[in-house]
Image (cartoon, rainbow, N blue to C red):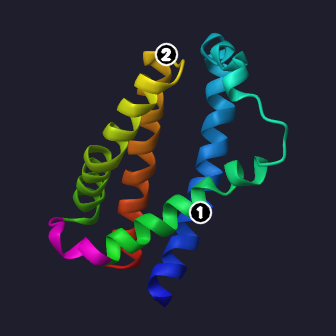
Amino acid sequence: MKKILLSGLAVGSLLFVLGYGSLFMAIRFFPDFFTSYSNPLFNSDGSRDILFYLHAFVLSLALAWFWERFKGMFKGNFIVRGLEFGFVYAIVSLIPVMWITFSALDVTVTMVLSWLVYGFFQAVVAGILFAKLNP
């Protein structure tokens, strides 16, 4: 349990920094894409903003548990294991979630695809770090 918590918190910290850094860069270089977020669907009264900011830690702790449970199934060096981990997560979780999100909410295909790529990137980074921290 200690390995799960420590690696999960370490990965969560990195994902938090990478996530907000990449968001800043994306807004700076693709401002037209982010105008679609001016939809009332994305406006919050601020009461739940902390949940948004904790996302990296919730995700990383869940992925740390998943890694601990199934790490023996991923073969190869740490980069290959991280990539395979990201693909498994994307196929099992991200694609179904993006499918239901696109079918139920007024979001664009571009938004959903960007979320899919971002989620895959997060899982690959997490997988690489887990393979190094908790082989």
Quarter location, residue 129: bottom left
Q: Kindly identify which residue carries mark 1.
A: 57
Q: Kindly identify which residue carries mark 2.
A: 108
**Viewed as shown, does residue 132 lie left or right of 45?**
left
Above or below, comparing residue 128 to residue 117 in the picture: below
* Magenta residue span: 69-76
Q: Nearer the viewer, residue 63 or 135?
A: 63
Q: Circle 1: is it few (<14), some (14-19), or many (20+) Cα within 10 Å?
A: some
Above or below, comparing residue 84 to residue 90 in the picture: below
Q: Are marks 2 and 1 in contact (CB under 8 Å)?
A: no
- Residue 18 appears at what percent x and percent y? 59, 48
Residue at image coords 45%, 49%: 122
**Viewed as shown, does residue 114 lie left or right of 82?**
right
Kind of residue indicated by mark 1: Phe
Quarter location, residue 56: bottom right
Tell me the element at label 2: loop
Magenta stretch, main secondary structure class: helix
- Residue 41 appears at what percent x and percent y? 67, 25
- Residue 31 appears at what percent x and percent y? 67, 15
3D distance between C-alphas at marks 2 and 1? 27 Å
